[in-house]
């Protein structure tokens, strides 16, 4: 945004960039990408989700370059993503095929397949662990060796893998209406700008790419009263989803001809939202709707918040800002919001001077 020419601007910018590198290196320690991947799992998952690119190594590189600033890391990752060719479209991913490593329900104590706590901070004391200050690589290897030698409960072990979905169980009881199949080609917000009113595929894409804090904050506002929802987690699952593509040699709709190219770790949440429905003769009954959330990596809070906003935007109640799709979708995007706020640091000499001139004339 070159508003005016500034003498010496190029030299000053070059020195600023040198200073930036100095600040990163001044303690004489360089972060290894493997260390970032190994020790910053939560940040890696957040950056991959918001950056809309599933690659731990590239996410770690962005985090290193951004000195741990997640907003800058997401900006870098999205910028790189925009340079990549799209060679294939994956086959439809069915989350029923998820190899589950964590699965809980806040709605039911007993669910088909059981609850699997997995790895989570939910059950820890939120106190600083000062022993980590002295932790070494040797300590880690020793702990892992002991952990891997612990006896495994065969009954618990068999429960991990592909598990039935709680929502399907409720549908069999007639507590949910069957979902209608929508085979329309989903819109791609990375190739075509948002248009209003949005389609649900657009909304879900923007929500899953949204800045974690912003998505969580607006979902919290929905529950506090700036919305009409009070949901419950029907099922939250974390695990790995297999990804397939069609044969690059010949196109075929046969699943047997598809190529397995890998798996992605994801968090999926189905939120249960009670609604009051008026039946015949003015009789009112309570039914349930679903709010859906799906994110790269283990992003549980964001996936829950996404499910809340999904249902809120689906209703589209304009009495609340959280029901206004333009308000929500435009303001949760990390790159858009951070970029616009950051641009205020750039030169605005001409526009500001014109405002000053107007004020001075008014004073006279």
Image: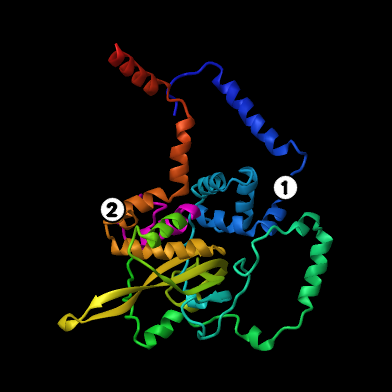
Q: How many marks?
A: 2
Q: Which residues are magenta?
A: 185-214
- Density class for disc 2 (Cα within 10 Å; few <14, some 14-19, many ≥20) is few
Relative to 41, say whether 101 is above or below. Answer: below
Residue 182 is left or right of residue 44, and the answer is: left
Residue 261 percent coordinates (x, y)? 57, 67
Colour scheme in use: rainbow
Q: Nearer the viewer, residue 125 or 104?
A: 125
Q: Is residue 196 magenta?
A: yes
Reading the image, the residue beneath label 2 is 196
Q: Residue at x 30, y 14 (%)?
A: 363
Q: Residue at x 29, y 64 (%)?
A: 315
- Density class for disc 1 (Cα within 10 Å; few <14, some 14-19, many ≥20) is few
Chain-order first, disc 1 or disc 2: 1
Instruction: Please tell me the numbered disc located at residue 31.
Output: 1
Q: Is residue 21 magenta?
A: no
Relative to 250, say whether 333 is above or below. Answer: above
What kind of element bears circle 1?
loop
What kind of element bears circle 2?
loop
On the question of residue 9 being in view, the answer is: yes
Look at the image and tell me in which quarter the N terminus lies.
top left
Look at the image and tell me in which quarter the C terminus lies.
top left
Q: Residue at x 80, y 58 (%)?
A: 135
């Amino acid at each position: 945004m070159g508003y005016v020419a500034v003498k010496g601007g190029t030299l000053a910018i070059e020195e600023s960039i040198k200073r930036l590198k100095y600040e990163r290196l001044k303690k004489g320690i360089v972060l290894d990408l493997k260390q970032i991947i190994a020790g910053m799992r939560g940040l890696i998952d957040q950056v991959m989700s918001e950056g809309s690119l599933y690659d731990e190594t590239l996410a770690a590189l962005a985090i290193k370059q951004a000195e741990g600033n997640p907003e800058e890391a997401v900006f870098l990752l999205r910028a790189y993503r925009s340079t990549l060719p799209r060679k294939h479209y994956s086959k439809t991913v069915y989350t029923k095929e998820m190899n589950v490593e964590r699965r809980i329900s806040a709605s039911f104590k007993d669910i088909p397949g059981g609850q699997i706590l997995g790895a989570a901070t939910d059950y820890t004391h939120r106190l600083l662990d000062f022993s980590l200050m002295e932790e070494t690589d040797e300590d880690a290897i020793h702990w892992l060796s002991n952990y891997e030698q612990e006896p495994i409960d065969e009954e618990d072990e068999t429960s991990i893998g592909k598990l039935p979905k709680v929502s399907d169980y409720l549908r069999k009881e007639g507590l949910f209406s069957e979902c209608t199949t929508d085979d329309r080609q989903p819109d791609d917000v990375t190739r075509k700008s948002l248009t209003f009113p949005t389609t649900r595929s657009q909304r879900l894409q923007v929500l899953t790419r949204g800045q974690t804090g912003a998505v969580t904050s607006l979902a919290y506002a929905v529950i506090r009263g700036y919305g009409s929802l009070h949901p419950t987690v029907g099922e939250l699952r974390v695990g790995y989803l297999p990804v397939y593509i069609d044969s690059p040699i010949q196109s075929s709709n046969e699943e047997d001809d598809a190529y397995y190219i890998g798996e992605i770790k994801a968090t999926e949440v189905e939120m249960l939202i009670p609604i009051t429905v008026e039946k015949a003769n003015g009789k009112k009954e309570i039914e349930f709707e679903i709010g859906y959330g799906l994110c790269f990596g283990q992003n549980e809070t964001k996936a829950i918040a996404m499910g809340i906003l999904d249902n809120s935007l689906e209703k589209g109640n304009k009495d609340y800002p959280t029901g206004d799709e333009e308000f929500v979708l435009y303001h949760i995007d990390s790159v858009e919001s951070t970029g616009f706020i950051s641009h205020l640091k750039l030169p605005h000499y001409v526009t500001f001077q014109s405002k000053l001139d107007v004020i001075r004339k008014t004073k006279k």
